[in-house]
Image (spheres, rainbow, N blue to C red):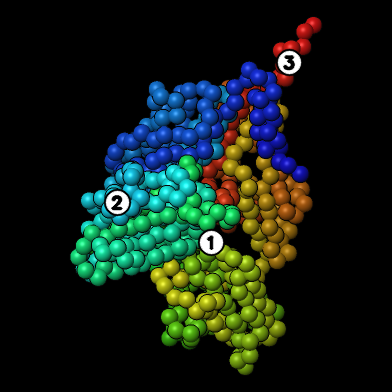
Amino acid sequence: MMPNCIKSILTLTFFAFTGGFCQSAPAITAMFPTGVKIGTKADINLTGKFDIWPIAFWCSNPNIKVTALNTKGLISVDVPPLVQPEQIWIRGYDPKGFSEAKPLFVGNLNEVLESESNDKSKTAQKLESPSIISGRLSKSGDIDCFSYSLRKGETLVASLCANQIFNSPMDAVLQVVSPEGFVLGQDHDENRLDPELVFKVPKDGNYIIRLFAFPSEPNSTIRFAGDSGYIYRLTITNGPFALVPFPLTFPALKSGLVPIRGWNLTQKCNTAKLEASSNATDTLSHPTWANSVSAIRCEGDSLVLDPKSKIPLPIPSTISLDSPSTKTPHSLLIKLGKGKGIDIKAKSQSLGLLMNPVIRIRNAQGNVVHVFEPQDLHQDTVGTLNSVNDEIYTLEISDLFDHSSLRHICLLEITENKPNFDILSTVDSILISGKKPIELIVNLTKKNGFKEPIEITAEGLPKGFIFTQESNPKTDGQTISLKFSATPGASPGAFQLSARIKGSSVPKRRILAKSINGPDRVNFWIQSVPELEITNPTNKK
């Protein structure tokens, strides 16, 4: 059954087109350029449809000012100096409705616009310093080339964001070409369909970073692809580039210096400061980095694998570990009592990393009793171990393909096998037309016989909106229905949803809005519009 919030959006669109004279809500399909340097102001072009202009804008970072300029589809984004590098979300809205939230980056490096003609090495666009290029493979057969001066022994990092985050329909390839014209390095799918190239420079010279793409959905053409939607964000640097914190997780409310893994990280920039917070994730950055990374908060201690340890792990445990550089798997010990069980999850792909974890479980006699591995492409590994006797088990963890690199890391979560739940929304916005309440459907996954009632709260709900939930919500076991209504003059805005077992003292968990090609979102948008009437101007009385 279609959720009512989606029905409302479809109904609004229907009225807009059938009325002939009605205005529709703003629609943003893309923003270009793709980012703004911290401490500067930049004009951003919006692709989409705007029956009303100017319109208002919401930004996920309230310190960043977004303003509509006089030219339709042109906005100004003002990023103050103290903002840290991150991906932000921007949404446009007017009295008729709102657009989808679209991503924009703010960072430390120079923001450069790709300029044609740069199809060949001889006409490559020259970069003077580490830069982030906003570009577009604008036509079929398009190739973009960038020239960068490097010295022997330096490490070049060229990292592309296109299909991920921006949902550009491209399967890109990055190459590094020598001053003599030889291809010295190539990457195709380091981050799913987005390449990332790390290259050790053999001698001084001007090197070419070359970019081209195939369509993300293969077709019958045999040539490089491109059109107006092939938007990308390309980082080119021989400076510090952060990959992940290690360990990957940190206890809730912990603060301090966090070790960072990546490339070109010296002792002056291989840690980042983590502030105490109750967030599910925190952004880590450094003024010299080309990017930022996320630190995940966890309950209990966060451990790093100690291969020499013969002590069984505590339950629950959160362990960060590398893919073994040899074919010998990592080994961990777990002690379970008779009739006890644990849930095991090895996360990597969901964190944007590359490991495909395989977990073999051996009993005290050394016999394999379980093998857990990813069930599909880009999936994490999950499993359950139940013990018949008091026993110490050995967990052997390796990569499915015996691969090893900086990105082949996983987060192993071991928790007691007890009733629990996961909760997620498939939409991130609510449109209320008139006085009729709207239902927001969130998906519920019950685990290990979970039966408790769930209490959901709406935090930061804008003025004039009302959220209600039954005292004992009846669910079909897979969804929960939440109701929202509006009073006259309700102010549009963002809010967050949290859930926990009713009456429990366990901290609330955020309900996230699922995103297809990027990180799940914590902010929901709500807006009320006047009730629409169908009017047929040709119907004469």
Residue located beneath label 3 in the image:
536
Q: Secondary structure at mark 1?
A: helix
Q: Secondary structure at mark 2?
A: loop
Q: Is residue 68 above or below residue 406?
A: above
Q: Residue at x 39, y 55 (%)?
A: 211
How far is disc 3 from disc 1 in space, using C-alphas?
50 Å
Residue 276 appears in the figure: no
How far is disc 2 from disc 3 in space, using C-alphas?
58 Å
For disc 3, the neighbor class at 10 Å (few under 14, some 14 to 19, many from 20) is: few
For disc 2, the neighbor class at 10 Å (few under 14, some 14 to 19, many from 20) is: many
Residue located beneath label 2 in the image:
124
Task: Give the amino acid at mark 2.
Answer: Ala
Task: Give the amino acid at mark 3.
Answer: Asn
**Residue 169 horizontal side relative to residue 111, left or right:** right
Q: Residue at x 30, y 63 (%)?
A: 181
Q: Secondary structure at mark 3?
A: loop
Q: Residue at x 65, y 73 (%)?
A: 384
| Mark 3 or mark 1: whose residue is earlier in sequence | 1
Task: State which mark lies toward you, 2 or 1.
Answer: 2
> From the image, which quarter does the N terminus lie in?
top right
Task: State which mark lies toward you, 3 or 1.
Answer: 3
**Residue 517 horizontal side relative to residue 125, left or right:** right
> From the image, which quarter does the C terminus lie in?
top right
